[in-house]
Image (cartoon, grey):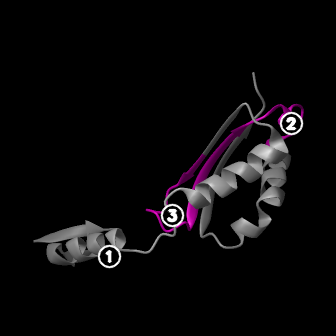
Amino acid sequence: MYRATGLMRQPKAFTGLARLARFYSEIPAEGSYERLVYDKLAAKLAPQELVVKDVSGGCGSMFAIKVVSGEFKGIPMVKQHRLVNEILADEISKWHGLQLRTQAPK
């Protein structure tokens, strides 16, 4: 039996091996890197809402971040994103991707 994964088809046996590889990947301390990112944003933006989530499966290469902060009032979304990118420049350089949502409080 074959199972579709992305654009490639792999035998079902291989998909189980991939799951095992992810299970045994070495993560320093689960959530500690998320906490570092969270703390950096919290210190600079004093957010009313802040969510930092590793969406890479635990390897720390892709994050989804949502920031609601009064610092964003009257600032276009592009500039809000630039501000977050400046704060996290060192971290972002190590990542594969970032899903970023920003907004001012309503």
Q: What residue is drawn where x is 78% and y is 31%?
A: 104
Q: Secondary structure at mark 1?
A: helix
User: What distance separates the C-alpha of mark 2 from that of mark 1?
Assistant: 42 Å
Q: Where in the figure is residue 39, as x and y percent of width and height?
A: 72, 50
Give the CA distance from mark 1 to mark 3.
Answer: 17 Å
- Dot 2: element: helix
Residue 34: x, y in percent?
A: 60, 55
- Relative horizontal placement of residue 78, taking residue 98 as reference (left or right): right
Asked if the residue at tag 2 contacts the one at tag 3, i.e. Cβ–Cβ closer than 8 Å, the answer is no
Q: Amino acid at mark 1?
A: Ala
Q: Nearer the viewer, residue 29 or 4?
A: 29
- Pointer 1 residue: 21
Question: What residue range appears in magenta?
Answer: 52-77
Considering every residue shown, the one lying at the far front of the view is 29
Q: Tell me the tag on residue 29.
A: 3
- Residue 94, given in percent of the width and then of the height, sits at 66, 73
Say few, some or many: other residues with alpha carbon within 10 Å of mark 3 (under 14 / 14 to 19 / 20 or more). Answer: few
Q: Earlier in the sequence, mark 1 or mark 3?
A: 1
**Closer-to-camera residue (4/37):** 37
Horizontal side of 12 relative to 41 (left or right) equals left
Question: Tag 3: residue type?
Answer: Ala
Q: Amino acid at mark 2?
A: Glu
Give coordinates of residue 102: x percent, y percent.
Answer: 72, 41
